[in-house]
Image: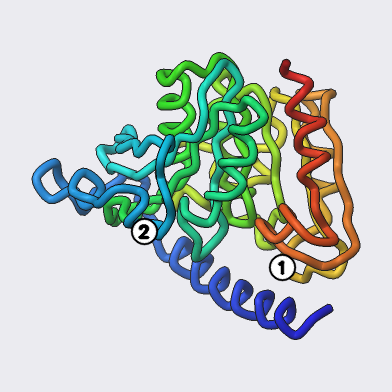
Amino acid sequence: MTTLGALSRAVLASALAVLVATTAACGSKTPTTASSADDSVAKSSPGLGAQCGVNDTGVEKLVITAADGINIIGARFGSGDHGVVLLPQLGNDLCSYWSYGKELSGQNYNVLAISYRNTGYSDEAKWDDKTADAIAAVRALRKAGAKKVVLIGASIGAATTMITGGRFPSELDGLITLSLPPGDLDMTNGAGDDPHVPSEAAPLITAPLLMCWSQGDDSAIDPQHTIDLATKTTNKAIITKTGGFHGQAMLSGPDDVRPDIITFLKKFD
């Protein structure tokens, strides 16, 4: 494992520890927002080119309103019936998926990458329920023409993908996780009804499920136990790599799972 990989694991482990401590401290299940229609950062945000420092020609900026009123930013690449929603890992926003969004759209997928609440130019919120952002993105992509939607999440996005799949099983056609983190994290910040963590969500998932991880990545767990809990779906598989790379780093390099993802997505063609 490289020094960079070790540092990345250490930073992620520290950040996840803070996330777990913050979540555990929250007892209420009633969402409380910190923004309003008048002070929405998302609604007044600059174009995607300015946000990400890229040429945004042909990429649509979306302002998506979650069920609790929080506005998040999305970038939509391509069009068509087959949709993919991309959920980033800790510390990243939609810009981190720019190249991959372009790549998938070039293969005729209707792709939506988002910045979670409290991230990038999305609104701030006291209640950090990332599943609310994820399902809002899925619904926005359906409004944009997608008839089938697969949710892909990296690291905390992987945990969010699992919980979203358990909460809204009928609204998702497929789930892909990249490096599910340890700790059975509550990505809902305690909001809403069960499930709140991946182990609770797995038995409720009905959509096809692909779980990717890399041996030697101390910031990810072997997903075998989690996928075994997903008894309502028989269409499930694990992709195991050996380079020790984490989350979105598995979309390139020696742990590249992009071919595996395309094989999975083609099941919906």
**Helix or strand or loop: what does disc 1 sit on?**
loop
Q: Let me know if residue 132 appears in the view.
A: no
Task: Report the coloring of the rendering.
Answer: rainbow
The residue under the point 61% across, 21% down is 82
- Along the viewing direction, whichever of 175 and 168 lies nearer the viewer: 175
The residue under the point 63% across, 52% down is 154
The residue under the point 80% across, 28% down is 231
Residue 3, position in %: x, y? 75, 85
How many numbered marks does the figure carry? 2
Q: Is residue 72 above or below residue 267?
A: below
Residue 62 got which mark? none
1 or 2: tag closer to the N-terminus = 2
The residue under the point 15% across, 45% down is 36
Q: CA distance from mark 1 to mark 2?
A: 23 Å
Amino acid type of the residue tagged 2 in the rendering: Gly
Question: In this image, 152 relative to 223: left or right?
Answer: left
- Along the viewing direction, whichever of 187 and 118 lies nearer the viewer: 118
Give the residue at mark 1.
219
Q: Are marks 1 and 2 in contact (CB under 8 Å)?
A: no
Question: In this image, 242 relative to 87: left or right?
Answer: right
Amino acid type of the residue tagged 1 in the rendering: Ser
Q: Is residue 194 above or below residue 45?
A: above
Q: Let me know if residue 216 appears in the view.
A: yes
